[in-house]
Image (cartoon, grey):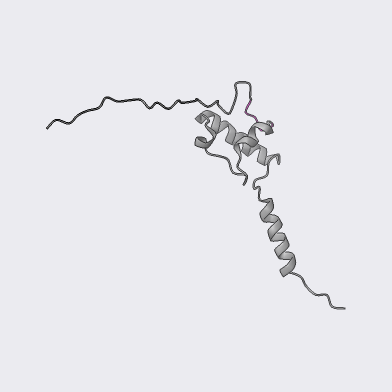
Amino acid sequence: MEKFKRPFRKSKRSFRRRLPPIGLGDQIDYRNMSLISRFISEQGKILPRRVNRLTLKQQRLITIAIKQARILSLLPFLNNEKQFERTESISRTTGARTRKK
């Protein structure tokens, strides 16, 4: 019994190549906040390479620039404003002391 072998077919879906997130004119630098902020999540974490669609060299440079900006206080280490507001309001209600008159 011989098995019938089909020839390999390419999928007929059109593949649209995405544009790279970093253009040729963009310089990766800790002062370029508009570029750096695109590669940080809402929580303040550095996004991975597969999400960013960056080359290995670009990802390394972005990571170094983000870390330098954090050290120079241009970027926060954590971006948890909502969590901070929630803990602040809880501490006010539970930690209220009564004054003696």
Relative side of 61 to 7, left or right: right
Relative image position of residue 53 (x, y in whole percent) = 52, 32
Q: Quadrant of the C terminus?
A: bottom right
Q: Quadrant of residue 65?
A: top right
Relative image position of residue 40 (x, y in whole percent) = 61, 40
Q: Residue at x 74, y 68 (%)?
A: 93
Relative image position of residue 29 (x, y in whole percent) = 65, 30
Residue at the bottom extreme of this rendering: 101
Q: Quadrant of residue 85?
A: bottom right
The correct choice, above or below, for 48 with respect to 78 in the image is above
Secondary structure, magenta segment, majority class: loop
Residue at the top extreme of this rendering: 24
Q: Nearer the viewer, residue 66 or 47?
A: 47
Relative image position of residue 35 (x, y in whole percent) = 64, 31
Residue at the left extreme of this rendering: 1
Q: Quadrant of the N terminus?
A: top left
Relative side of 49 to 90, left or right: left
Q: Residue at x 62, y 39 (%)?
A: 67
Relative side of 9 to 54, left or right: left
Q: Quadrant of residue 98?
A: bottom right
Magenta-highlighted residues: 27-31
Q: Nearer the viewer, residue 31 or 42?
A: 42
The correct choice, above or below, for 54 with respect to 25 in the image is below
Q: Nearer the viewer, residue 14 or 85?
A: 14
Query: How many marks are shown on the rendered structure?
Result: 0
Q: Residue at x 58, y 31 (%)?
A: 61
On whether residue 21 falls in the magenta region, the answer is no
Q: Residue at x 51, y 29 (%)?
A: 55
The correct choice, above or below, for 13 with respect to 77 in the image is above
